[in-house]
Every structure is written in C-alpha cells, then in structure tokens.
Image: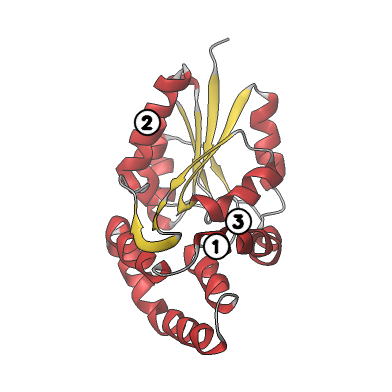
Amino acid sequence: MPAKAAFYDVDGTLVKTNVVHVYAYYAMNRGSLLGIAGRTLATAASAPLFAAMDAVNRKKFNEFFYRYYAGLSEDRLISIAEDMFEDVLKPALYEQTRDLIDQARRAGCRIVLVTGALDFSMRPLVRHLGADDLIANKMQFVGGKATGKVIPPIIEGANKANAIRSYCVREGLALDQCHGYSDSSSDYAMLAVVGRPTAVNPDMRLRSIARAYNWPILDLK
C-alpha cells in the first residue's frame, strides 16, 4: 500500500476557534496592564475589519493580522502557547475531532495539520492529537522579538496546496491516495490537490462545491 497522509485544516475544521481568538489570548496575557489593555482593545476594535479582510483576501488578511504580534517576545509566545491551548483550543475541539483523526490513522495515514496559524501556537494541539507533523506559518523573530512578518510563503489558499504537494514529494507519499479535510472554500486548492477530499463543517460555497464534485461532507458537533 502506498504511503499516504491525511491533511487537516484546523480553524473551523478541528476546532471552533480562529486565529483572532488565539491572538486575543496573547493580548490579554502578556506584558504590562496598560499594554494588555491596549492590545485587547485594539483587537476588539479591529474584529470587524479582520472578518471583512479574511472574507475578501485570506493572504492579505494574514499579512495584516500578524503585524499585531510585532514586539512580542519569542520565549513568552512559546510559553503562553501551552496555557492558550488549555484555555482556548482544547475546550473548542469538536467532540468528533478525535474520531476523525483516529479513523485516518487506522487507515494507515500520517496525520498532518495544515494551518495559517503560527507554528508555536499549534504545537500543543499537535501533541494533544498525536499528529505526526505540522505545516504552519512561521513568525520572523529578530533579537528574540517578533517582527510582525511571516516568513514566506504564507500558508493559505493555493500555498496550502503547494505545501502539501511539496511535503508529499519530500516524504515519498502518494498524493492521489492522501486525504484532505477543510471547512472553507478558501481551501479549495488544498482539497482539490489530494485524491480524497472531504468538506468538514463547510461554508456555503464549499458545501456547493463539494456537492458538485461529489465530495463527502461531514458536519461535526
């Protein structure tokens, strides 16, 4: 049997949260009281803008959003990630997430999370789910401080598909035997590049696409 993997988007697919929830946690748990208040208020005030940008252009949204991390300490970001997982991500896991992953593992798949979130914020989730690998955005750090810039290429849209394709070549996996799971039409390329795509909690556009291509649709709770 050819080596294969199951690639999972995270936000909306495995958990009910998104990158804004993750940043908000960092904003409320790092630095002076004045700094915390400022970042928290800025995040809340910008939430409608974040949503609008994400809907229009995921790449531009990521570039804009991650500027909010500028100046934060790398060590602190990594240490807070553990608490953030316990307080934000773990409670937001869909009840059937573990079953979805276990099913792929029993089928002989390597488990890989593919997300536009920052890698340090996802590593506790990777460990909790027993995933084998992570494809995620990487923050640029200079002198131990975040610059607010993500090291290219930004993991989103077509770049997710490119990253999956490159991963399969590097690891000797059969792309046409691999599975892909996502909730968003912005991940159409990611789903289309694998041989066995599944729409999970799909948005209206992805649900329509999945029906047109006869892809399986899962609605997790």
The three-letter code of the residue at mark 1 reads Leu
Report the disc number at residue 15.
Answer: 3
Report the disc number at residue 143.
Answer: none
Determine whether the residue tagged by mark 2 lies in a helix, strand or loop: helix
Numbered disc in front, either 1 or 2: 1
The three-letter code of the residue at mark 2 reads Val
Residue in front for this viewpoint, 187 or 63: 63
Q: Which residue is mark 1?
A: 77
Residue situated furthest top in the rendering:
1
Q: Is residue 152 visible?
A: yes
Give residue 145's position: percent from left, percent from top. 43, 63
Q: Are marks 3 and 2 in contact (CB under 8 Å)?
A: no
Residue in front for this viewpoint, 114 or 101: 114
Q: Which residue is mark 2?
A: 193
The mark nearer the N terminus, 3 or 2, is 3
- For the residues labelled 3 and 1, the Cα–Cα distance comes to 20 Å
Q: Is residue 185 above or below residue 81?
A: above
The mark nearer the N terminus, 1 or 2, is 1
Give residue 184's position: percent from left, percent from top. 43, 52
Q: In the drawing, does residue 200 fall left or right of residue 70?
A: right
Determine whether the residue tagged by mark 1 lies in a helix, strand or loop: helix
